[in-house]
Image: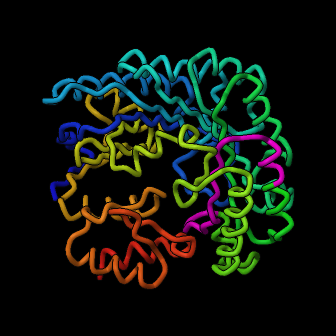
Amino acid sequence: MPVGTETSEPVLGDFGGGPFGIYVHVPFCATRCGYCDFNTYTAGELGTSASPQSWLAALRGELATAAQRFAALPTATPEVATIFVGGGTPSLLGGDGLADVLDAVRANFTLAAHVEVTTESNPESTSPEFFDRLRTAGFTRISLGMQSAAAHVLKVLDRTHTPGRAVAAAKEARAAGFEHVNLDLIYGTPGERDGDLDASLDAVLDAGVDHVSAYSLIVEDGTALARRVRRGELPAPDDDVLAARYERIDARLTAAGLSWYEVSNWAAGEAAACRHNLGYWDGGDWLGAGPGAHSHVGGVRWWNVKHPARYSDRVGEGGLPAAGWEALTPEERYTERVMLAVRLCTGLPLADLDADGRGAAERVVADGLAARTADRLVLTDRGRLLADGVVRRLLVP
């Protein structure tokens, strides 16, 4: 597997023929949540080494450089089908700042006629005026970090927004004309009760959103939450509780007309599904711009340097600000295809499996973890709870 380091430019593969997306990473947060291990920084951690202004200038430079590199590939750069601004807390940039981000993409790439443009937002840094500005700028989709409607759960997670603000923000986004609004939930937080989860689901459904993402709490090494669990201050999440909570979420959302299309995501119909994330899960191509962002084009993956100050310096030096890169082998691409496609409601085409994988698929079906739907392998309800185990069985028969 060809591999590069920070001192070498990624050797790009040609576009794979599928939809092309752009992810923009905003590394700024007002505070650091105890469970988060994303590449984010508070103002106190950065000091004078980086700012939203220096980050935006570097972002413009990276986008311009990437467009130049792509123009040299044998196949013309596809139109941008999806844009996703994530973080961090993109809403800290304000409506004008996010409009500047979208303008920077437009200045270097051609957007498709019906491009999906999403931004993540912290409910506390939004307002009706914020959403109006985003609609005017060209954003089409909002994703709000709700996590829970229970104050004591938010406190354990070190979330700063007040219970109820996420629902209010979702309603403000819809009033501004956003048809597609997502709320994120985290379940299984120490101290969360069934009633707390029910209250969160009640709030989500009251908000009238057309998309919900729900993730089990993972205690990541190096986080404040991990240190609290290690010291015995908080219990680790219980697998049986997590499974029961997932079933509870799925039942409530399904009854309300939101169907699962990926193990952790539910939408009110095909149009409400996040097309940007589907691009990842379907093995598409994307440019990841910003500190620590990952990119993939034609089987070549690269990842940017993480610190915003170093990122700005690297962009200023010319070239892509990559910390490293790799060209995926056929075996690695096969593994990723199985890992991602299995998680989708459309399932994994059996033709994509090798002989050992097809044999393993038959055993997975016999165990009730998946079903054969036409020529595809689709997880059952029980299989969704054990999706990672199904993947392991398919890859290591």
Judge whether 135 appears above or below 218 on screen: above
Q: x and y percent of residue 355 in the render?
A: 20, 75
- Magenta range: 202-223
Q: x and y percent of residue 20 in the render?
A: 35, 34
Toward the viewer: 309 or 188?
188
Instruction: Identify the residue at image location x=76%, y=40%.
Output: 208
> Considering the image in quadrants, where does the C terminus appear?
bottom left
Q: x and y percent of residue 88 in the render?
A: 59, 42
> Considering the image in quadrants, where does the N terminus appear?
bottom left
Judge whether 122 appears above or below 186 on screen: above
Can residue 39 be seen here? The reply is yes
Instruction: Identify the residue at image location x=44%, y=66%.
Output: 378
Instruction: Identify the residue at image location x=56%, y=33%.
Output: 118
Judge whether 306 appears above or below 134 on screen: below
Residue 118 forms part of the magenta stretch: no
Can residue 44 be seen here? The reply is no
